[in-house]
Each structure stands twice: as C-alpha cells, then as structure tokens.
C-alpha cells in the first residue's frame, strides 16, 4: 500500500516525551534509541513511512511542534 | 502533496523550557494558532503569569507583558481600557489564577472586562516543585501532601469554571482537556470561540484547559494523559458552562 501521508521531524527540537508514539493510530512511530539529539534525548521517528495516512494526530499531541505533516 | 500541519507563525521559532511531555506546549500552540487564524497577531497583547509559563513572553509571536503573581487579569484590564483596539489575552496556570489571583479573575469577570483568559489547570504547583495547589484532587499525593490531600484538613479542590459561570459579567466559560487528539481539536475550537467573543465586544471569556505535569506527578507523559482522563475529568467535567451569545439567541 502506498503512503497517503508523510511526517517530518525537526529532530533537534524533540524532547523524547513519546506523546506522538502513543497518539499514532497505526503505531508506526518509535523513539530512536540509536540517536541522541542536540538536547540529549532519543528523538521520535517514523519506523514505517509507507503506512502513514497523514492524520496529523501525532502533530496534534506534540508539545514542541516537532512534526510537519503532509498529505498526498 | 499538501501540508496539513506545520508550526504556527504565532509561536517564535525557539525551543521551550518546558519539561518533556508537558502539555503547556500544546496549549501554547492552540492559543497561537487561534491568534493567527483570527488575524490578530499584529495587534494582540498577551499577559504572562508567574509559574511554569512565566516565560510565555519568549514564545508567543506578539507583544507580551509580564504581570505580578496572579495579577494578570488586572494588568489586562488596564491594557484593554487604555488600548481598546488591541486584542488582550492572559495565559495563566492554576497556581496563579486559582490561588493567589482568584480575587483578580473573579472581579475581572464581575466587571465584564472585554478580555480573554486561557487558564491551564494541572492540579499541582509545577515550577516550585510539585506542592499542593487549590486544584489538587482529594487524595492526590504532592510534596506537601505526601499522604494525599485530605479535604478535612486542606479543603476541597476549587472548580474555577463552574464558579465563574455563575457571574453575570462572564460571557463565555468553557472547560476543555488536551488528553487526546480529539480533545485537543475541541480545545482549539473553544479557545478560538473565546477570542471571537472578545473581538465581538461581548465581554469576559475564559477557557479552562486540563493539563498534565508528568514531572511532578511522577508519571510518564503518555500515562499522565491517562491519569488526567481517569482522575481529573470526573471531578472537573468538560463542557461549556456559559455562552452569553447562545443565551441571547434563545431569549429572542
């Protein structure tokens, strides 16, 4: 299935709170345990971009406006 | 491809000092988006409180004024009366509005001042280290109520929205929550409506937003939202408590 949406993260603004991960209806967001950003947190990322539907629930819950959402 | 969500111009492009998962960030965004969508960013004056959101003046992309603890509605009254063409709002927490500043907000509502207030209720004093606030729930553990708040000793939690809805001067009072994407969208609508009430010159408007404090509650951010849903919403029911514009419509 082709992706219907795309999420872009400003990774260095992320504080790693995980609210986007819990808000995603498709459970495709994860915390990147391999990376440490400028602030010293593990930032969120989209583990399976092909499944994104562009619902913007993650962006709705992000307290730090890290996420930009596009829809095809 | 269309961008369906991006950072609002109502917030400056800076990182906030809030703890990870603090819903102040969401409420800042909703307030800023409402200002941007109503086209009042260039003539808005915000009044910042004392508390966690004391540095709100660094984040909103409009003119801001800092007020003494709890006195934001009084400062906003002065600004609005001297500059009636400006859009004036205050952004206050529960330690500011519901405790030291209760008199100010009650009298601003009684005078029917044409200002808007965003009231963030997270049931605890965040900035000073998690002490019991007037809005702390019965039985809730804080650093000054380690065995849980005992209403017989410390009184009952104060319901600001219900109290202000009884005041004849208040035009719009609503309580919303930011615990889920759907509720965040509802909160945005309420804040925008409250701001429209001021632009229409109808008088005092206040939106109480139930918020979390993961750090001082000692709960992970996603679980803090669950805690809010299960513990705060039963005591602080969501909904509109007063809308003068609707009351006028039914009177006619």
Image (spheres, grey):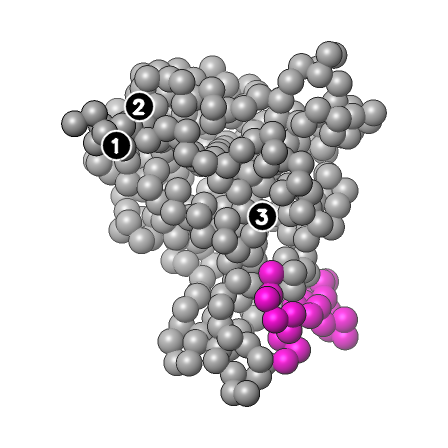
- The residue singled out by tag 2 in the image is B113
Q: Chain of mark 2?
A: B
- Mark 1 or mark 2, which has the lower sequence index? 2
Whether residue B190 is situated above or below residue B49 in the rendered picture: below
Whether residue B142 is situated above or below residue B181 in the rendered picture: above
User: From this viewpoint, is residue B29 visible?
Assistant: no
A18 left or right, relative to B83:
right
- The residue singled out by tag 3 in the image is B179
Q: Badges 3 and 2: C-beta atoms under 8 Å apart? A: no
Observer-nearest residue: B25 or A7? A7
Distance from the alpha carbon under mark 1 to that under mark 2? 16 Å
Question: Which label is found at residue B245?
Answer: 1
- The residue at 49%/66% (across/down) is A56
Q: Quadrant of residue B87?
A: top left
Query: Bounds of the magenta span?
Result: A23-48
Quarter of the picture holding the N terminus of chain A: bottom right
Q: Magenta segment: does it hold A38?
A: yes
């Amino acid at each position: 299935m082709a992706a219907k949406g795309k999420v872009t993260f400003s990774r260095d603004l992320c504080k790693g709170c995980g609210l986007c991960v819990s808000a995603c209806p498709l459970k495709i967001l994860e915390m990147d345990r391999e990376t440490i950003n400028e602030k010293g947190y593990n930032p969120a990322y989209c583990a399976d971009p092909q499944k994104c539907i562009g619902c913007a629930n993650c962006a709705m819950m992000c307290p730090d406006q890290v996420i930009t959402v596009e829809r095809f | 491809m269309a961008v369906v969500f991006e950072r609002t111009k109502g917030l400056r492009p800076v990182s906030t000092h809030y703890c990870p998962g603090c819903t102040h960030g969401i409420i800042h965004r909703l307030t800023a988006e409402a200002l941007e969508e109503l086209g009042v960013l260039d003539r808005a004056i915000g009044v910042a409180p004392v508390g966690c959101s004391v540095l709100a003046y660094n984040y909103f992309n409009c003119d801001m004024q800092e007020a003494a603890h709890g006195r934001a509605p009084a400062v906003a009254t002065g600004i609005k009366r001297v500059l009636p063409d400006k859009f004036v709002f205050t952004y206050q927490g529960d330690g500011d509005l519901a405790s030291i500043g209760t008199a100010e907000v009650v009298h601003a509502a009684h005078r029917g001042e044409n200002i808007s207030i965003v009231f963030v209720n997270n049931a605890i004093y965040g900035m000073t280290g998690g002490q019991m606030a007037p809005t702390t729930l019965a039985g809730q553990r804080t650093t000054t109520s380690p065995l849980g708040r005992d209403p017989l000793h410390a009184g009952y939690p104060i319901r600001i929205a219900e109290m202000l809805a009884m005041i004849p001067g208040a035009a719009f009072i609503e309580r919303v929550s930011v615990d889920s994407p759907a509720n965040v969208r509802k909160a945005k609508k309420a804040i925008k409506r409250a701001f429209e009430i001021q632009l229409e010159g109808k008088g005092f408007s206040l939106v109480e937003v139930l918020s979390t404090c993961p750090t001082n509650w000692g709960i992970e951010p996603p679980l803090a939202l669950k805690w809010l849903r299960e513990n705060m919403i039963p005591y602080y029911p969501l909904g509109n408590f007063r809308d003068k514009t609707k009351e006028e419509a039914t009177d006619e």
